[in-house]
Image (spheres, rainbow, N blue to C red):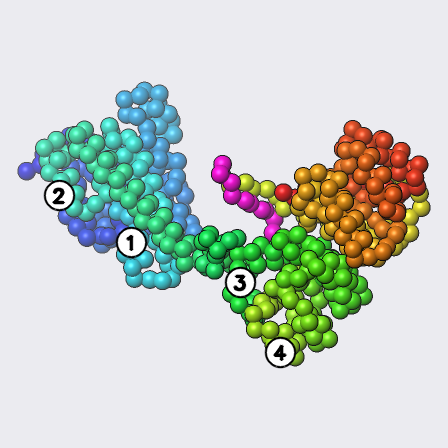
């Protein structure tokens, strides 16, 4: 027989999903002078069993919110669980805050493992991720010197046996044993949840034929807002390299509003052109470097016409990207069974980029600065025609999407020479000029660079080859010399607002 005489009121916080043996628990704890604090459904069940229960919001003075997602997460609860009963400063602080003294926490968790076996509904599964329960258990277990935590129904009997031995209290060894059990349980619970997330992530993986090379395995995790496989209308399976090239091409194409064609080869534009019609834009972009365009990725920002589809079919391309096609156009393009046809809007925006390294994942804000009249400013005072000014803007839009060191030569909204990915800017310039001379005999073109010219050597080469305008970032200690050279040789010079490196 338990002697309850002179027992002070003790508080047990009970919040259980599984309410089996709750009657046994309440009956025995009442004998030891315990009063119950509980949440929602548990409080209701205790009262149905004939015992008193104080709803937790009566203690916190804060109602349950978010359909019960937030019940026990409150300072008055956690202060009670975490204050040290042998520290006078803690005791004074608790007394001033009028926080009750909770001695016992009994919590069992939402059955996450059971729900993932029974349901495929992601929303239902996520709602079974217990937040308050593990938090209560962990806080109380940290303070095991003073508080008892019970996290399993099977331990109810052990609790009562220990209390019978200790006149309604528990001994330190028992509390420490239950704390250890709690931390193991909450750790295992978190592992089950994290494993489920890993499995769900794996389901979101689309394996590709191979990576950059046949000996490399690869897959892509789907972007829920745009799944490239849902955009494919024709052709062989999309490859790792296809995806990277399409991504690069869409980024470049998004700079343009007028009918524009971008042809990508190994992530770099090899031909870019704008015109009055999309057919003209394609013709100009292809002529920019037809040799490099072989086997490339063609991206257009306007609907492909039947006339253009017939023209495209004359050449070998890996991928065609357009925001729209009509039925007849598709019939024409699908004559090439392996040709990958994608229907994608070119105005897709992302705000952050990331890349994996051996040191960790690098993140950066995407460069979303609009290239317009506010992006470039005149340095020389020579008059400039609207046509040349528009070529400078066009030029720097393309430069932005080439690997450094990048040089672009432009005439009439068409790239006539491109140099990229070289270890010095002079080599990039010479490659661009070589390409220009192979495909065109053009003078009075404009040049764009993604970084400053460190010396006047590049400007002298451009002057020798009839360049009439240059647009580039500032920042070189030789900027003054370059400005003076341009003024002396009547070369129009503009500086960009930002540097445009792409590694």
Q: Mark 2 touching mark 4, by CB under 8 A?
A: no
Q: Mark 3 touching mark 4, by CB under 8 A?
A: no
Give the tally of numbered discs. 4
How far apart are labels 4 and 1 at the CA level? Answer: 50 Å
Q: Please tell me whether mark 3 or mark 1 is closer to you in this view.
A: 3
Which residue does the image show at 42% across and 54% down from the upper left? 201
Q: Please tell me whether mark 2 or mark 3 is closer to you in this view.
A: 3
How far apart are labels 3 and 1 at the CA level? Answer: 37 Å
Q: Position of residue 190 (x, y in %)?
A: 33, 45
The residue carrying mark 2 is: 157
Is residue 255 positioned above or below 230 on the image?
above
The residue carrying mark 4 is: 331
Is residue 276 positioned above or below 32 on the image?
below
Which residue does the image show at 49% across and 38% down from the upper left? 358
Is residue 251 positioned above or below 503 on the image?
below
Q: Mark 3 or mark 4: which comes first in sequence? A: 3
The residue carrying mark 1 is: 113
Question: Is residue 371 among what the camera can see?
Answer: no
Which residue does the image show at 78% across and 41% down from the upper left? 472
Q: Mark 3 touching mark 1, by CB under 8 A?
A: no
Q: Mark 2 or mark 4: which comes first in sequence? A: 2
Q: Mark 1 touching mark 2, by CB under 8 A?
A: no
The residue carrying mark 3 is: 238
Question: With 464 as the anchor, is 191 left or right in this view?
Answer: left
Q: Mark 3 or mark 1: which comes first in sequence? A: 1
Question: Which region shows up in magenta?
Answer: 349-360
Residue 356 counted in the magenta span: yes
């Amino acid at each position: 027989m338990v002697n309850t005489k002179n027992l002070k009121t003790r508080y047990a916080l009970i919040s259980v999903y599984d309410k089996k043996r709750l009657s046994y628990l309440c009956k025995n704890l009442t004998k030891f002078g315990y009063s119950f604090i509980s949440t929602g459904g548990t409080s209701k069940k205790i009262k149905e069993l004939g015992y008193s229960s104080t709803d937790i919001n009566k203690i916190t003075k804060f109602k349950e919110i978010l359909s019960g997602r937030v019940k026990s997460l409150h300072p008055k609860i956690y202060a009670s669980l975490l204050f040290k009963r042998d520290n006078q400063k803690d005791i004074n602080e608790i007394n001033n805050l009028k926080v009750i003294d909770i001695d016992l926490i009994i919590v069992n968790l939402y059955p996450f493992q059971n729900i993932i076996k029974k349901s495929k509904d992601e929303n239902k599964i996520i709602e079974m991720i217990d937040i308050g329960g593990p938090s209560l258990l962990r806080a109380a277990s940290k303070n095991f010197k003073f508080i008892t935590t019970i996290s399993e129904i099977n331990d109810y009997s052990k609790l009562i046996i220990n209390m019978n031995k200790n006149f309604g209290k528990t001994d330190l060894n028992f509390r420490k044993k239950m704390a250890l059990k709690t931390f193991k349980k909450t750790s295992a619970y978190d592992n089950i949840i994290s494993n489920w997330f890993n499995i769900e992530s794996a389901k979101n993986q689309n394996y590709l034929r191979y990576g950059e090379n046949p000996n490399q395995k690869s897959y892509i995790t789907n972007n829920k807002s745009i799944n490239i496989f849902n955009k494919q209308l024709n052709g062989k399976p999309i490859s790792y390299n296809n995806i990277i090239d399409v991504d690069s091409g869409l980024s470049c194409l998004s700079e343009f509003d007028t009918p524009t064609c971008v042809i990508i080869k190994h992530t770099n534009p090899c031909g870019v052109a704008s015109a009055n019609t999309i057919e003209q834009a394609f013709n100009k972009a292809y002529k920019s470097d037809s040799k490099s365009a072989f086997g490339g990725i063609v991206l257009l920002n306007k609907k492909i016409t039947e006339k253009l589809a017939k023209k495209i079919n004359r050449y070998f391309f890996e991928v065609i990207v357009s925001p729209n096609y009509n039925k007849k156009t598709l019939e024409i393009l699908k004559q090439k069974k392996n040709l990958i046809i994608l229907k994608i809007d070119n105005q897709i925006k992302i705000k952050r980029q990331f890349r994996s390294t051996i040191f960790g994942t690098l993140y950066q804000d995407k460069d979303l600065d609009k290239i317009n009249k506010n992006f470039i400013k005149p340095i020389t005072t020579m008059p400039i025609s609207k046509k040349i000014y528009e070529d400078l803007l066009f030029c720097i839009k393309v430069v932005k999407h080439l690997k450094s060191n990048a040089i672009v030569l432009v005439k009439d909204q068409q790239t006539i020479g491109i140099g990229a990915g070289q270890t010095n800017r002079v080599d990039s310039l010479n490659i661009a000029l070589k390409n220009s001379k192979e495909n065109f005999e053009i003078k009075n073109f404009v040049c764009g660079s993604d970084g400053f010219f460190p010396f006047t050597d590049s400007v002298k080469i451009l002057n020798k080859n009839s360049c009439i305008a240059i647009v580039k970032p500032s920042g070189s200690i030789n900027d003054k010399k370059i400005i003076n050279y341009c003024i002396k040789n009547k070369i129009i010079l503009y500086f960009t607002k930002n540097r445009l490196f792409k590694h």
